């Protein structure tokens, strides 16, 4: 028996009638996939992990059960695990020492703006890399090595240790693969950070990268017995033309013509919707903005086209809401889940293969806090009691996307034309046939009466018109809530990170249309 809360009951009953609707919005949905529908990866939502505290994420000895479960939840839905990139700022602060058991880190003092700072330096040993065998079976991993130091022997040492780990029996048993090696994190900023002099530009980057890549690939190819894929770029910004740090600039300067450059398979761009690096707060509704999301991603269209013209894969290799670990009261809220869902689906529509949402211990924008925390993630104040491992609202965006994309590996997606400034819609096709749709209402509900709109559907093109629709709702108490979120009546806010509660969906005739509330997402499955 399914037991619904009073609020869920109200939502489901109102769906049956548009009597109280503030407006009706007709939406045309194609029955067959149009030409601009994009193939979408089942691991569209993947994760970038700050390397300094990798051991806290993965566990030492047995796997960290909470982190494992949150990854495995997504694998069970999509039949493909999220991919993991390990690196980021601490990638360029890491050196290898075989005498070190796992890792030795030095951390600076924390502050109100940065409650959980990154390590200033990291020394790692073989076991540091071996621990990736504890990820869910079948997980592809991208691992970063230190390019900032511009020390080829150091980079070769790191890459050799990585390759040896992935050739070990534990990795082979779990089918955990080295998807790519990345060299350097946000190298376009090296001159700003004192890591290169003021002559640093795209030409000198390509020259130095190629010299290091030749040595790294020679060593790693020999260990693996195959040519290791490389992930290129990883820039914080893009000039969007051949004159600066960008994919176009790399290609113009011949990065693909060397033996190592021929092993580049992925081009990574880092991108955030804003920054909290100087402690400037932002308004949640600015993040939850359909127009801002599109304006934020739109400038990367020429970069994506340039990468695809070379037959390479374009990813957002590090991304999230606000740089420097997120903005308090924004990145950690329920509203961020709606932002993340729309952001990722729109990126897929543009041709982004995968988004690696950055995560670090205690970061505000995390999907998951994998260990107990003793300081507030918002301002660094001491907590009365340690806060156990838990998911944050953004995690639900990954769950919804996995369900919408489905497990078959043949799904295509297209953005729908929704005549509303704050409601986004996407149709999903298995092969060529319409299967599901997602609608996202980005209006930030804080208190008072919750507004809603009524969607009606017109089906276009060749195919069988659906007669019914199953509605599944993401309930968010308010846009600024940090807990109490449910998806189809179920919650992932549990001690073990696994889903709990009874599933609550509603099947209605498709001709009835559907209500969508402010600060809500819905998944429609057509039948």
Image (tube, rainbow, N blue to C red):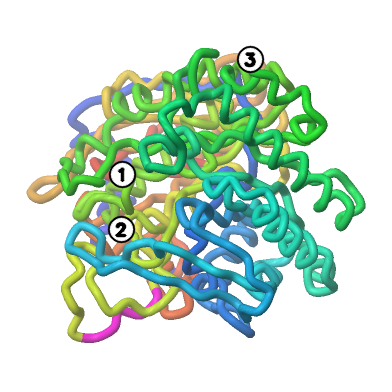
Q: Which mark is residue 107?
A: none
Q: Percent x, y for residue 2?
A: 43, 69
Q: Is residue 482 above or below residue 303?
A: below
Helix, strand or loop at disc 2? loop
Q: Percent x, y for residue 138?
A: 74, 60
Residue indicated by mark 3 = 252
Q: Earlier in the sequence, mark 1 or mark 3?
A: 3
Left or right of 462? Residue 479 is left
Q: Earlier in the sequence, mark 3 or mark 2?
A: 3
Q: What is the magenta range?
A: 385-389
Query: Would residue 95 be seen by someone viewing this image from the given angle?
Result: yes
Which residue is pictured at 67% across the width and 59% down the height?
Answer: 158
Query: Which residue appears farthest toward the right when viewing the image?
Result: 225
Q: CA distance from mark 1 to mark 3?
A: 31 Å
Q: In front: mark 1 or mark 3?
A: 3
386 inside magenta stretch: yes
Residue indicated by mark 2 = 364
Left or right of 364? Residue 417 is right
Q: Earlier in the sequence, mark 2 or mark 1?
A: 1
Contact between marks 2 and 1 (CB within 8 A): the answer is yes
| Total number of numbered discs in the rendering | 3
């Amino acid at each position: 028996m399914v037991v619904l809360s009073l609020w869920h009951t109200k939502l489901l009953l109102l769906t049956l009638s548009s009597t109280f609707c503030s407006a009706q919005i007709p939406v045309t949905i194609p029955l067959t996939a149009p030409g601009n529908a994009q193939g979408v990866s089942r691991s569209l939502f993947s994760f970038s992990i700050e390397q300094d505290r990798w051991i806290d994420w993965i566990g030492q000895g047995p796997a960290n059960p909470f982190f494992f479960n949150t990854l495995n939840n997504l694998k069970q839905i999509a039949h493909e695990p999220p991919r993991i990139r390990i690196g980021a700022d601490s990638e360029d602060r890491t050196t290898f020492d075989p005498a070190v058991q796992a890792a030795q880190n030095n951390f600076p003092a924390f502050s109100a703006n940065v409650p959980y700072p990154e390590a200033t330096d990291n020394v790692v040993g073989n076991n540091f890399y071996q621990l990736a065998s504890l990820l869910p079976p079948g997980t592809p991993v991208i691992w970063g090595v230190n390019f900032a130091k511009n020390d080829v022997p150091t980079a070769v040492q790191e890459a050799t240790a990585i390759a040896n780990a992935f050739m070990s029996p534990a990795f082979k048993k779990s089918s955990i693969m080295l998807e790519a090696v990345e060299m350097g994190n946000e190298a376009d900023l090296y001159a700003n950070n004192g890591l290169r002099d003021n002559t640093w530009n795209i030409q000198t980057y390509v020259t130095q990268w190629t010299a290091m890549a030749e040595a790294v690939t020679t060593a790693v190819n020999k260990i693996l017995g195959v040519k290791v894929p490389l992930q290129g770029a990883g820039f914080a910004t893009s000039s969007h033309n051949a004159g600066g740090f960008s994919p176009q600039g790399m290609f113009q300067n011949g990065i693909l013509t060397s033996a190592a450059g021929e092993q580049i398979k992925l081009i990574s761009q880092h991108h955030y919707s804003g920054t909290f690096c100087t402690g400037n707060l932002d308004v949640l509704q600015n993040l939850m903005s359909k127009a801002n999301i599109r304006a934020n991603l739109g400038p990367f269209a020429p970069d994506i086209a340039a990468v695809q013209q070379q037959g390479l894969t374009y990813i957002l290799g590090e991304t999230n809401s606000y740089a420097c670990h997120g903005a308090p009261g924004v990145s950690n809220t329920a509203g961020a889940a709606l932002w993340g869902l729309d952001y990722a689906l729109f990126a897929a529509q543009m041709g982004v293969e995968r988004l690696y949402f950055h995560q670090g211990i205690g970061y505000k924008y995390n999907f998951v806090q994998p260990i107990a925390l003793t300081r507030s993630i918002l301002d660094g104040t001491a907590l009365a009691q340690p806060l156990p491992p838990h998911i944050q609202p953004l995690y639900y965006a990954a769950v919804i996307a996995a369900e919408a994309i489905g497990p078959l590996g043949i799904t295509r997606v297209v953005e729908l034309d929704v005549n509303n400034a704050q409601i986004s819609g996407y149709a999903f096709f298995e092969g060529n046939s319409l299967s599901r749709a997602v609608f996202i209402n980005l209006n930030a509900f804080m208190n008072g009466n919750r507004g809603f709109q009524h969607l009606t559907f017109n089906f276009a093109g060749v195919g069988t018109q659906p007669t019914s629709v199953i509605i599944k709702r993401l309930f968010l108490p308010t846009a600024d809530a940090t807990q109490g979120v449910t998806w189809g009546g179920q919650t992932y806010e549990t001690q073990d990170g696994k889903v709990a509660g009874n599933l609550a969906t509603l099947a209605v005739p498709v001709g009835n249309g559907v209500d969508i509330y402010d600060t809500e997402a819905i998944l429609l499955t057509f039948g």
